[in-house]
């Protein structure tokens, strides 16, 4: 007998998971509890509910395996000092006169080459505070630049959210990364404009005019050269691009760790491989466990009529069906305050419905862009990590949320226009 779960059950399950996450229950357990409640209320019974949860978790396993192996690259970039060197090189290149642009670009590039978003913000934050003190920029404006750069970089990165969407839509990782390059550029430009306006507002965060040019003096002792630091990410991109360029397929499962290890050779630090990859694995394990939890609730939602009802609502209000892609990404990432979890749930649940309206690449790109709009809400990790990195009180960090959302909206809107309106 085919299992059927009501839309009400799926919604109650999702609300339960959100409530538990907000109450600081471990997100993975929150998702599992929400899935169990949703299945029971939705009429699946205990046996049917468990079957849906297991099936949902199984469907996300290929993405989890690739995410775990991507920890090799992330760990090497962070622990070797390559991430700091790349950030420092970018800021030195553009100078203090373009400080806000430099900070946003540095965070964007770090995220884009495979560093976690929160780690990228933490990495650039000390440099940002040095610049801010000397140029008169408040931490409020500086963090707005970092968060905008992180969001722009996230949609073109080989990070867990991108891997999850590529897996569910059966896309090449390189194709999905490349698809949102223009929206990411729009997000970067929008971030710089927003930060420029914020720095001029006389709201207690005024940037003094006429400051002398600042020489950025960061300690780079023991760090690799810029070119060797870039070697790993460049090799990864080259390996992933082999398929669209010459038809040779190198799966991300192999390309990401291979690039990281090759980068270690270039930096002359291959003897440090064990602690570096151990660090990367430790960073990836919470994400992997979280995604297993999201898989369980995804299985409940996928079995329900929620996706059909959401499509029906869009049709009833005369909204294009392709809007299901960004809207589902926005809602699910907002519910979990995680682009990775949101991407996994939205893509596995609504992927088939989305591809009936647009191509898999267009749908994946729009959904992926949508996941970064609300991923920095207070019940998620990056909200608190970014506040701590900039020594910002929680109340002050809350004031920045509308700016976070606006910066994410620019990227999501640009992707939707590009793939939903222009390319449709």
Image: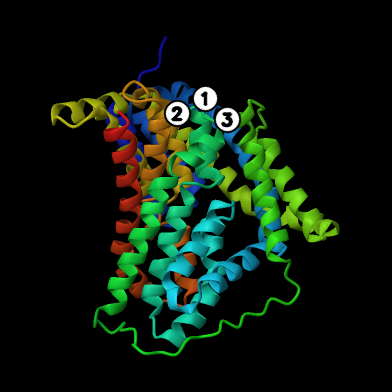
Q: What residue sits right under mark 1 in the picture? A: 55
Residue 139: quarter of image: bottom left
Dots 1, 2 in contact, CB < 8 A = yes
Judging depth in this view, the residue of 114 and 179 nearest the camera is 179
Dots 2, 3 in contact, CB < 8 A = no
**Residue occupying the point 31% across, 51% down:** 409
What quarter of the picture does the C terminus occupy?
Answer: top left
What quarter of the picture does the N terminus occupy?
Answer: top left
Could you say whether the residue bearing mark 1 is in a helix, strand or loop?
helix
- Viewed as shown, does residue 70 lie left or right of 120? right
Going from N to C along the chain, the mark reached first, 1 or 2, is 1
Q: What residue sits right under mark 3 in the picture? A: 244
Q: CA distance from mark 1 to mark 3?
A: 32 Å
- Viewed as shown, does residue 252 lie left or right of 290? right
Q: What residue sits right under mark 2 in the picture? A: 299
Q: Residues within 10 Å of mark 2 (few under 14, many from 20)?
A: many
Could you say whether the residue bearing mark 2 is in a helix, strand or loop?
helix
Q: CA distance from mark 2 to mark 3?
A: 32 Å
Place of residue 282 in the rendered image (x, y in percent of width and height, measured from the top left): 67, 53
Q: Is residue 236 above or below residue 142?
A: above
Place of residue 160 in the rendered image (x, y in percent of width and height, measured from the top left): 55, 44
Going from N to C along the chain, the mark reached first, 1 or 3, is 1
Place of residue 257 in the rendered image (x, y in percent of width and height, measured from the top left): 71, 44
């Amino acid at each position: 007998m085919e299992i059927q779960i009501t839309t009400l059950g799926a919604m109650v399950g999702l609300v339960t998971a959100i409530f538990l996450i907000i109450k600081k229950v471990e997100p993975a357990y929150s998702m599992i509890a929400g899935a169990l409640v949703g299945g029971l209320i939705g009429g699946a019974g205990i046996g049917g509910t468990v079957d849906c949860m297991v099936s949902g978790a199984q469907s996300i396993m290929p993405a989890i395996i690739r995410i775990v192996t991507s920890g090799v690259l992330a760990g090497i970039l962070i622990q070797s000092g390559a991430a700091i060197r790349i950030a420092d090189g970018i800021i030195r290149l553009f100078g203090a006169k373009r400080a806000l642009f430099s900070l946003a670009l540095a965070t964007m590039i770090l995220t884009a080459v495979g560093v976690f978003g929160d780690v990228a913000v933490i990495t650039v934050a000390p440099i940002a505070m040095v610049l801010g003190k000397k140029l008169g920029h408040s931490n409020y404006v500086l963090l707005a630049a970092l968060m905008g750069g992180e969001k722009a970089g996230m949609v073109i990165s080989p990070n867990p959210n991108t891997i999850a969407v590529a897996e569910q839509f059966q896309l090449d990782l390189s194709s999905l990364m490349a698809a949102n390059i223009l929206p990411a550029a729009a997000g970067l430009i929008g971030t710089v404009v927003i930060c420029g306006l914020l720095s001029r507002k006389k709201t207690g965060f005024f940037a003094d005019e006429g400051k002398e040019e600042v020489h950025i003096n960061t300690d780079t002792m023991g760090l690799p050269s810029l070119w060797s630091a870039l070697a790993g990410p460049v090799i990864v991109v080259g390996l992933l691009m082999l398929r669209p360029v010459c038809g040779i397929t190198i799966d991300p499962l192999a390309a990401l760790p291979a690039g990281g290890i090759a980068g270690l050779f270039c930096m002359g630090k291959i003897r440090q491989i064990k602690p570096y990859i151990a660090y990367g694995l430790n960073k990836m394990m919470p994400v992997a466990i979280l995604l297993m939890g999201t898989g369980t609730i995804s299985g409940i939602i996928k079995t329900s009529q929620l996706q059909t009802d959401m499509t029906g609502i869009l049709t009833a209000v005369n909204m294009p069906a392709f809007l299901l892609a960004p809207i589902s990404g926005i809602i699910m990432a907002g519910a979990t305050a995680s682009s990775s979890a949101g991407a996994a749930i939205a893509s596995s649940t609504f992927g088939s419905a989305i591809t009936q309206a647009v191509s898999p690449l267009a749908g994946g790109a729009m959904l992926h862009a949508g996941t970064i709009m609300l991923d920095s809400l207070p019940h998620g990790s990056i909200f608190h990590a970014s506040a701590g990195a900039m020594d910002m009180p929680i109340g002050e960090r809350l004031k920045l949320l509308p700016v976070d959302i606006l910066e994410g909206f620019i990227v999501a809107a640009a992707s939707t226009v590009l793939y939903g309106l222009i390319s449709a």
